[in-house]
Image (tube, rainbow, N blue to C red):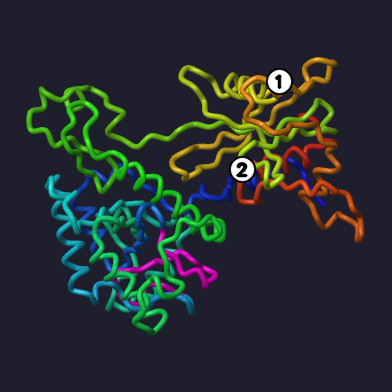
Amino acid sequence: MSHSAHATIIEQQNDIYYGTEVLNRVSFLREDPDFITDSVGHASARFIFYENTNPLVNSQLDDKLVLLTNGDNQLEGPQVCKKGLQNLQQWTQVVETWAEANKNHDASMRAPERPTFLFLGLQDESVGLDLKSLKAADDGESEHYLDHQGRYQGIPYYAVDVTNAPTVRDLVVDFYNSEINNNNQSAADNDVIFTAHRKHHIGFTNTEASLFSHGRMFLDWLARNRFCPGCGSKVIPVHAGGKLKCTNSEASECPVQSATVSNVSFPRTDAVIITAITNTDRTKVLLSLAKRHAHTNMYACTAGFMEPSETVEIATKREIWEETGVVCKKINVVLTQPWPFPGNLMIGCIGEVEFDGESEVVNLGHDRELSDARWFDIEFVRKLIYKNEVKDGEDFNPENILLPFPESIAHSLIKLAVDQAGNKGKL
């Protein structure tokens, strides 16, 4: 059975898919070249690999996202690679070359066969790392965590984009295959692939999903932005991938370099509002069928991009009216979710509509994005969410209506609306 709406919100906020807190980003350390050099070369460093923003996965494992380390015996479990990349001289050279270029802001960082490294953060005690057990297990042969200045202790994580470095790509894939699969096949010949398929992304654990999302959003931004919007010169990633720097040597000729504050030097996140809409007494839910999803019969929440100078509440009301014709006056912001396709933040709301004979009337004639929108009884939607409540042989869904997949914030919001039934106002 469903439980309290408050409990549901807390659970979702702490464990949202693509947005679980798994690393301490220590973003200020991105600017410290000594820290970056030490961390990227440390034995415990973990690396996630991407090609064209697609992650390297082993599709046949439970933990699909491929993680490799520098040192030996850094990862636990039967399905992990025990040997470290530092056994490969070529890998060590790649890391050292990048670290030096990052330190010096070298314009060659975008050169062919140069992978892009992105510092993601430290897995430390603030996110649940048992540092004491690592200290106790230290055998003196290979350090299992980084200790920087005695203040920042943990396991460094990096995302690595090998799109422009096919030699490094093949090096990593061949190494993984030989150590994990005990064969010499290439990634195209087995289950180790760089994949864009959502079935693999949705199959991640929450930790894997959050690591993937973090890396993908940054690397997509770095890949899309190769020239300065102010002067057209090439830009390079500095601060371990956290910032773009114009390479124009004449700062006075570049409005970006001469600006006091420049938001084009840092990654952007596009805000998207997404709303589950209910009536005042929580007996109905308004769900919509987008034209692009009409063939799937998947009914979902109302969603759209925020526009400049809009509040979340105003943007939500606007999108609801533009798409469905319904007038909604009460908006509660309840959940957010990063959405790495390519770089969105989904701002989840519950909208409440007063049934007065006019406000609740559906009209799809405004922007015409929807194929259908209608008010469903809450008990019908409850059975779509809680399938264990459906009685054997009960044909409650003759239209075969589907809801968004459970990992999406749309599903979480619809579930929250169901759980709020009978708990009016208890957020």
- Of residues 38 and 58, which is closer to you in this image? 58
**Residue 190 among magenta residues:** no
Check the image and report above or below for 57 versus 2: below
Q: Where is residue 189 in the image (x, y as percent from the top left)?
A: 41, 75
Check the image and report above or below for 209 versus 42: above
Q: How far is the residue under mark 2 from the one under mark 1? A: 23 Å
**Range of the magenta residues?**
55-76
Determine the secondary structure under disc 1.
loop
Q: Where is residue 348 in the image (x, y as percent from the top left)?
A: 61, 35
Residue at (30% x, 52% y) in the render: 151
- Of residues 11 and 318, which is closer to you in this image? 318
Q: In this view, does 106 lie to the left or right of 386?
A: left
Identify the residue position indicated by label 1 in the image. 325
Q: Which mark is residue 375?
A: none
Residue located farthest toward the front when viewing the structure as drawn: 295
Q: Say which quarter of the image contains residue 295.
A: top right
Identify the residue position indicated by label 2 in the image. 409
- Of residues 30 and 137, which is closer to you in this image? 30
Q: How crowded is mark 1: few (under 14 residues within 10 Å), some or many (20 or more)?
A: many
